[in-house]
Image: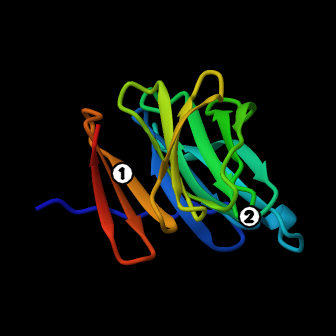
């Protein structure tokens, strides 16, 4: 039997919306306000280094609003994140420094889900605008759009890249083969 000893990571002053692990022992916690911004309408993503005896905050990434979702690239060097604005903007950050590497623009409503392909070359996003989009993560250029017909709430990719599954508000789970 495996037991997990909990230890709290304190950094957010309010709700934590989403978490993601990297392959290199980093944890991104995406939340609303932090103690420094608790009275304002800002969010912050904290990147925690869980290696070693004491977890520490490696970088802080400010966001305009609540952070909606986050995903690490397979090599752990980048973090994709989107906030709660209805524009659907996605930013790709350097996971070490927290600096913006590029912005992905194209969704017309909130981006609800993010996933990197196993090779890390592409990012796939799902949005309330009823589409899943494919992006070149190096250039930020759109590679394609898939109309899903309803708000995409969550998407997952099989590790071999052969299948994408989306969950939508219309009660459907859609499986798509590459």
Question: Tags 2 and 1 in contact by the CB under 8 Å rule?
Answer: no
Q: Is residue 7 above or below residue 22?
A: below
Q: Is residue 79 above or below residue 127?
A: above
Which residue is rendered at x = 25% and y = 36% of the image? Answer: 162
Label 1 neighbourhood size at 10 Å, few (<14), some (14-19), many (20+)? some
Which residue is rendered at x = 63% and y = 73% of the image? Answer: 15
**Residue positioned most to the left:** 1
Residue 112 vs residue 24, the one in the foreground: 112
SS type, badge 1? strand
Choose top left, top right, bottom left or bottom right for residue 47. Answer: top right
Q: Is residue 150 above or below residue 137?
A: below
Q: Position of residue 50 (x, y in %)?
A: 48, 43
Q: Can see residue 72?
A: no
In the picture, the quarter occupied by the N terminus is bottom left
Instruction: Name the residue tied to disc 1.
Output: 156
**Residue positioned most to the right:** 40
């Amino acid at each position: 039997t495996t037991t997990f000893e909990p230890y709290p990571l304190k950094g957010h002053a309010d709700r934590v919306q989403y978490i993601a692990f990297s392959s290199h022992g980093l944890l991104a916690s995406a939340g609303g306000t932090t103690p420094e911004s608790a009275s304002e309408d800002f969010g912050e993503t904290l990147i925690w280094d869980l290696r070693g005896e004491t977890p520490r905050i490696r970088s802080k990434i400010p966001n305009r609003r609540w952070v909606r979702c986050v995903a690490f690239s397979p090599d752990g060097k980048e973090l994709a994140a989107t906030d709660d604005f209805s524009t659907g903007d996605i930013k790709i950050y350097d996971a070490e420094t927290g600096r913006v590497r590029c912005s992905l623009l194209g969704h017309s409503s909130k981006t609800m889900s993010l996933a990197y392909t196993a090779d890390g070359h592409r990012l796939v996003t799902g949005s309330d605008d009823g589409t899943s989009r494919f992006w070149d993560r190096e250039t930020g250029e759109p590679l394609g759009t898939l109309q899903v017909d309803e708000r995409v709430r969550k998407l997952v990719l099989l590790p071999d890249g052969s299948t994408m599954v989306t969950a939508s508000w219309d009660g459907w789970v859609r499986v798509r083969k590459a």
